[in-house]
Image: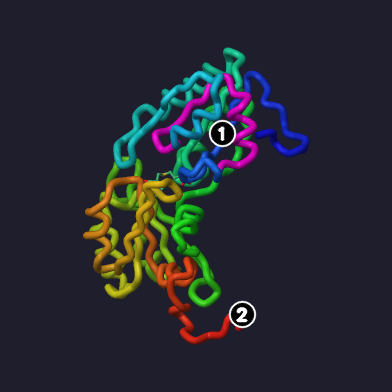
Amino acid sequence: MDLPAHPWPPFLPGWVWLCGAGPGDPGLLTLHALHALRQADVVVHDALVEPAILDWAPRALRVFAGKRGGKPSPRQRDISLRLVELAREGRRVLRLKGGDPFVFGRGGEEAQALAQHGVPVRVVPGVSAGIGGLGAAGIPVTHRDVNQSVTFVTGHDQTGEAPSALDWGAIARASEVIVIYMGLKHAAQIAGALLAAGRSPDEPAAVVTDATTPRQRVIETTLAGLPAAAASVEPPAILCLGRTVLLRRAVLGLDADPLRPGRPEGA
Ligand code: SAH
């Protein structure tokens, strides 16, 4: 497949392109990412990048720089330095990260390290799991009838613990819809904190695993049921709390609109 005509920026030797690979489905790559895959000399990728996507870079050397969520990551510095080294060797380096590189993905740290070493970087955003992954599962992160804000949080901090710096009370009050990345391990603690902050145990919640891949699975539950639902699946998973979860069936055409039953279409 040829790319459509466009003044595509050249991928110059010695540059690092820090690209998002999207949540899984190769069709969700950006055209810039595809363009980069075809020209890269080396692709440095995470565990969350689908293998089918790497097959689109047939001539590139593949370097796995994966980390598994929840573990401390002493090797982040090594990954950044490896990128610097590869770029200094005059290669076109594609750093490919799951979702969007700057959403809970340490892309910011890598870009900073590259800049400090004088390596030129182009940032290519991607579809983040907490928006596009939920969307593909039929859950809109905002809906006019439900919420005017959405909060994205990480379920664990750099040490792998539940993030101590987060003020769950403030988060619980601030926005109806809360999207939690890396939330499986500490789901019970997080749900407990939100309940303690006054959120209702009956509130709709969902767990979406392997979003946008053929393995995608969606569990609809409640805040009270979230810990058990989380314990029943393997990562990667996005947790979502709030009434937009109820819209899933309507969005997918399975049910009438649960928020406004009987509302005529377009009203
Ligand atoms: N930069 C990524 C997030 C990296 S953190 C992004 O923008 O999407 C890794 C976490 O992202 C996982 O623990 C999980 O919470 C979420 N995630 C990534 N891909 C996912 C997928 N296909 N399905 C569900 N969750 C996913």
The N terminus is located in which quarter? top right
Label placed on residue 266: 2
Q: Is any part of residue 174 visible from this angle?
A: no
Q: Is residue 30 magenta?
A: yes
Q: Is residue 46 magenta?
A: yes
Q: Residues within 10 Å of mark 1 (few under 14, many from 20)?
A: many
The residue depicted at 27 percent of the width and 55 percent of the height is 230
User: Can you give x and y, in whole percent of width and height, for residue 193 in the image?
Assistant: 28, 64
Q: Which residue range is magenta in the image?
A: 29-49
Picture quadrant where residue 265 is located: bottom right
Mark 1, secondary structure of its residue: strand
The amino acid on which the numbered mark 1 sits, given as a three-letter code, is Leu
Distance in Å between CA atoms under marks 1 and 2? 41 Å
The residue depicted at 61 percent of the width and 42 percent of the height is 30
The amino acid on which the numbered mark 2 sits, given as a three-letter code, is Gly
Q: Is residue 73 left or right of residue 224?
A: right
Label placed on residue 18: 1
The residue depicted at 30 percent of the width and 67 percent of the height is 221
Q: Residues within 10 Å of mark 2 (few under 14, many from 20)?
A: few
